[in-house]
Image (cartoon, helix red, strand yellow):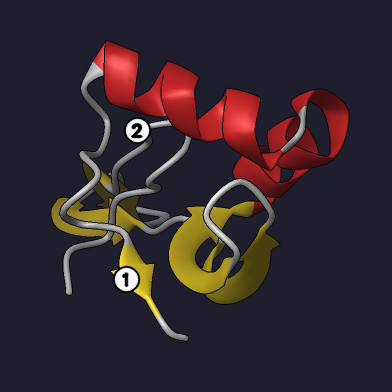
């Protein structure tokens, strides 16, 4: 599973670990990514999304249907990648 939020499109970033002697080694800055189940009223089913904490705040603010249509319009996910549970 890739580390990409399906609502915001955020990805894991790459940066440097910098030691006390200023030696730099590569590292990744991972997201606060988790899987969450939602009841999608428009389709009358449960769906599972992998999203970050900011994506959850967007869903709480706009609503699930508006957040999903915005994410599909911006190209962060498509309707086929959304996992339907029941």
| Cα distance in 3D space between marks 2 and 1 | 17 Å
Q: Quadrant of residue 41?
A: bottom right
Residue occupying image coordinates x 37% and y 73%: 84
Image coordinates of residue 44 in percent, x first then y, are: 60, 64
- Disc 1: CA contacts within 10 A as few (<14), some (14-19) or many (>=20): few
- Disc 2: CA contacts within 10 A as few (<14), some (14-19) or many (>=20): some
Locate residue 4 relative to residue 78 in the image: left or right. right
Q: Which mark is residue 9?
A: 2
36 relative to 23, above or below: below
Image coordinates of residue 46 in percent, x first then y, are: 56, 74
Q: Secondary structure at mark 2?
A: loop
Image coordinates of residue 66 in percent, x first then y, are: 62, 24
Which residue appears farthest toward the right when viewing the image?
61
Image coordinates of residue 2 in percent, x first then y, are: 17, 64
Which residue appears farthest toward the bottom when viewing the image?
86
Image depth: mark 2 or mark 1 in front = 1
Specify which label sits upstream in the sequence, 2 or 1: 2
44 relative to 57, above or below: below
Locate residue 30 relative to residue 76 in the image: left or right. right
54 relative to 38, above or below: above
Residue occupying image coordinates x 45% and y 24%: 69
Q: Secondary structure at mark 1?
A: strand
32 relative to 63, above or below: below
Picture quarter with the N terminus: bottom left
Residue occupying image coordinates x 30% and y 13%: 74
Residue occupying image coordinates x 29% and y 49%: 12
Compare residues 32 and 84 and report the one nearer the observer: 84
Q: Quadrant of residue 20?
A: bottom left
Q: Which mark is residue 83?
A: 1
């Amino acid at each position: 599973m890739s580390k990409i939020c399906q609502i915001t499109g955020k990805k894991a970033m790459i940066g440097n670990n910098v030691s006390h002697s200023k030696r730099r080694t590569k590292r990744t800055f991972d997201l606060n990514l988790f899987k969450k189940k939602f009841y999608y009223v428009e389709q009358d089913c449960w769906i599972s999304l992998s999203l970050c904490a900011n994506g959850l705040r967007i869903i709480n603010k706009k609503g699930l249907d508006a957040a999903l249509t915005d994410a599909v319009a911006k190209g962060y996910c498509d309707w086929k990648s959304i996992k339907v549970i029941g």
